[in-house]
Amino acid sequence: MTESATEPTRSPTGAPAGDALGRALTAEHAAVYAYGVIGGKTSGALLRAATAGFDAHRARRDRLRALITQRGGTPAEPGPTYRLPFEVRTPADAVRLAVLVEQRVTTAYLELAADRDPELRRFAALAAQECATRAYGWQPKIGPFPGMDRGGADSGGAVPTPGSESSGPEGSGGTPGQEAQPEASAPDGQ
């Protein structure tokens, strides 16, 4: 079957490629928000790492927006606020949040890496590699393969979700592929 100019590009699973692009963009919006919180709870070398993470996620977010626009889509706007999976009070909490965010963003890019478009696969693979490297830099230990459940207490929602940033330890209950979504009152660009 050949694709027409009006038919959306589809991934090997049959889902439109824009869906995976949109989920990666949503993950990046949440990461940018989370890194603002992380930077506010750190100093010195940790603050420098948070600033580098913030800048990297902003750049990836902007590139995803451009890719969506180039493909005729309308990129979603970020939510006005996101609920964090736990309260961030200390630098140790900030490090824990950074690791969780990087793991979840890696998962979003792994989905995009399955697309049949070689440009998207390369972009997603490099982004996933950067996120995995950044997570390891925050906490140098080998965890489960990105996207797989740890079976531990911190396997809950890793990226912020809509709402208040200080939601307490109950978390968002997110699962891979369910990164933060803009609040209903926020424009979603669609």
Image (cartoon, rainbow, N blue to C red):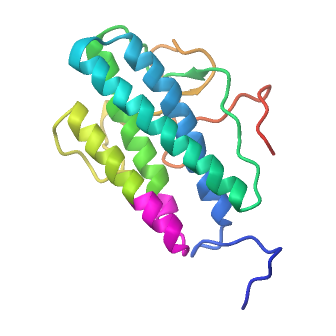
Q: Is residue 28 left or right of residue 22?
A: left
Q: Farthest residue toward the bottom?
A: 1
Query: Is residue 152 visible to us here?
Result: yes
Along the viewing direction, whichever of 20 and 84 lies nearer the viewer: 20
Q: Is residue 76 magenta?
A: no
Position in image of residue 131 (x %, y %): 35, 45
Along the viewing direction, whichever of 34 and 67 lies nearer the viewer: 67
Position in image of residue 100 (x %, y %): 37, 34
Q: Is residue 185 left or right of residue 132?
A: right
Question: What residue is shown at x 66% (from left), y 67% (from top)?
Answer: 15
Question: What residue is shown at x 57% (from left), y 35% (from top)?
Answer: 29
Q: Is residue 10 left or right of residue 119?
A: right
Q: Is residue 117 magenta?
A: yes
Majority secondary structure of magenta residues: helix
Position in image of residue 96 (x %, y %): 31, 25
Question: What residue is shown at x 67% (from left), y 21% (from top)?
Answer: 80
Q: Quadrant of residue 35?
A: top left
Q: Which residues are magenta?
A: 111-125
Position in image of residue 109 (x %, y %): 46, 54
Does 28 appear above or below 94?
A: below
Query: Is residue 179 visible to us here?
Result: no
Label tally: 0
Q: Farthest residue toward the top?
A: 89
Q: Quadrant of residue 137?
A: top left
For the C terminus, the quadrant is: top right
Does 119 appear above or below 24?
A: below
